[in-house]
């Protein structure tokens, strides 16, 4: 809490994204009482569970089921990587013509399911070369059935790898894509294509059980953030809930989300009005000042001023349409597959139409779905300041960390990645 005050962030910390560690939950509960008690619903949903971490738990829970099925592919990859001469033999195979020599093939780590996906995805690209290598080395390689099974598993895991990439983005807003990605995963786990697959059905069942444990009751704030995507608004929410729970339950849940959306809107509207009152606290209304002048006026001028006062006092009270009503009832922004929609630019262009909702969008769309970026920052610092370089002064360490981040987009992480992309099937 002292750090938040020192950096003047105590009144700017809108939400905190952390993983599921018990210590994190306890820490956020202490902060909640000091930071968010004035927020709607007591700030109970402003602690974001890292979506990438939860997705990792969901997938990892089912990886034991497919462990044996991908063992033949893992064994041949491990054999290639086991020595320099074997790797050289692999690179000299006729099937490797047209490819740059590999420095090594990706081998998975048991505790990281995404490494298994990366291994399978690369192995399938070099399927012919690996099969030929096994024959040349006189070792047991994957059979045709093993390769087919590896392809089914790889295609299945690709959906989770793509969702993880979306969750882990930190240079673009992601909170409005929460519903789209989460319900995409849910749809995958109940898809008959997989649930009736003799091999994948048990995997889907285990993952679905874990999915329901964490995401059966989605986070209020992230559902509100999904409504701030003008391409979907309430329509995607209604579709997802109808497919999952039926029309009657869907309408009830959609009504709840709209209520939460309205509560947050009214909170922001109240803050805007309070700010406006403070700004104009020393100014007097024009008509109010004129009322003091009324006794000093005569004739036509007195009549005109009296009419203005009378009209203001007896103006009919018409219900003003709120921004929420206007926004939700206005037409959706058309979806274009060949165009990357910039939700922040849209809100910037429409700030005059929806001034309060635009302020909401600035906060809600800034919520990161994952803590991967911040954890990566600490990992980077650990690689730069280690036991061999522990005497770096703070300015040098800061310069190294910042330079690496700024140059990252211009540097290729691995020459092989470029080669792989060119030769992707």
Image: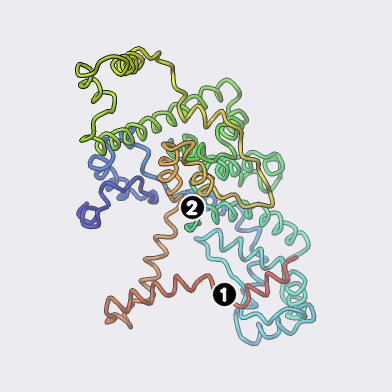
Helix, strand or loop status at disc 2: helix
The residue shown at (36%, 32%) is 269
Q: Residue at x 64, y 38 (%)?
A: 190
- Residue 310 position in % (x across, y down): 32, 13
The tally of labels here is 2
Are there few (<14), some (14-19), or many (20+) residues within 10 Å of tag 2?
A: many
Specify few, some or many for label 1: CA neighbours under 10 Å numbering under 14, 14-19, or 20 or more: few
**Image x and y of residue 245, in percent:** 58, 27
Expressed as whole percent of the image width and height from the top left, the position of residue 77 reads: 64, 72
Query: Which residue is tagged 1?
Result: 412
Where residue 352 appears, as percent x and y from the top left, is 47, 39
Badge 1 marks a residue whose secondary structure is: loop
Residue 141 in view: no
Give the camera-side residue of 387 and 322.
Answer: 322
Residue 84 tag number: none
Between the C-alphas of marks 2 and 1, the distance is: 24 Å
**Residue 52 — which label?**
2
Q: Nearer the viewer, residue 15 or 151?
A: 15
Q: Residue at x 62, y 51 (%)?
A: 159
119 up-or-down from 362: above or below? below
């Amino acid at each position: 809490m002292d750090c938040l005050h020192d950096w003047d962030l105590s009144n700017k910390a809108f939400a905190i994204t952390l993983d599921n560690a018990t210590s994190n939950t306890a820490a956020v509960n202490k902060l909640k009482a000091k930071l968010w008690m004035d927020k709607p619903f007591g700030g109970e949903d402003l602690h974001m569970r890292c979506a990438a971490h939860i997705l990792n738990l969901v997938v990892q829970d089912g990886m034991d089921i497919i462990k044996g099925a991908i063992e033949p592919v893992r064994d041949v990859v491990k054999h290639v990587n086991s020595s320099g001469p074997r790797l050289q033999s692999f690179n000299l195979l006729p099937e490797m013509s047209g490819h740059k020599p590999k420095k090594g093939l990706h081998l998975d780590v048991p505790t990281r399911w995404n490494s298994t996906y990366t291994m399978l995805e690369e192995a399938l690209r070099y399927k012919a070369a690996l099969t030929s290598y096994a024959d040349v080395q006189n070792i047991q390689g994957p059979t045709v059935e093993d390769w087919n099974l590896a392809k089914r598993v790889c295609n299945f895991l690709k959906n989770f790898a793509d969702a993880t990439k979306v969750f882990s983005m930190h240079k673009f807003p992601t909170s409005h894509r929460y519903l789209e990605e989460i319900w995409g995963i849910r749809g995958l786990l109940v898809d008959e294509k997989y649930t009736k697959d003799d091999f994948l059905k048990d995997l889907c069942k285990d993952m679905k059980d874990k999915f329901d444990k964490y995401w059966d009751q989605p986070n209020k704030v992230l559902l509100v953030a999904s409504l701030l995507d003008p391409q979907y608004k309430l329509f995607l929410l209604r579709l997802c809930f109808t497919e999952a729970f039926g029309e009657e339950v869907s309408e009830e849940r959609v009504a709840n989300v709209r209520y939460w959306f309205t509560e947050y809107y009214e909170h922001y509207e109240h803050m805007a009005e309070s700010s406006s009152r403070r700004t104009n606290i020393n100014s007097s209304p024009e008509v109010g000042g004129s009322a003091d002048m009324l006794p000093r006026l005569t004739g036509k001028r007195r009549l005109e001023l009296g009419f203005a006062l009378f009209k203001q006092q007896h103006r009919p009270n018409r219900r003003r349409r709120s921004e929420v009503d206007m926004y939700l009832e206005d037409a959706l922004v058309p979806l274009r597959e060949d165009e990357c929609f910039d939700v922040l630019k849209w809100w910037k262009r429409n700030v005059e139409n929806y001034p309060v909702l635009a302020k909401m969008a600035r906060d809600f769309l800034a919520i990161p779905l994952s803590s991967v970026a911040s954890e990566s920052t600490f990992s980077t610092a650990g690689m730069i300041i280690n036991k061999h370089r522990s005497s770096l002064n703070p300015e040098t360490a800061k310069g190294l960390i910042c330079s690496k981040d700024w140059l990252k987009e211009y540097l290729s992480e691995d020459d092989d990645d470029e080669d792989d992309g060119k030769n992707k099937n």
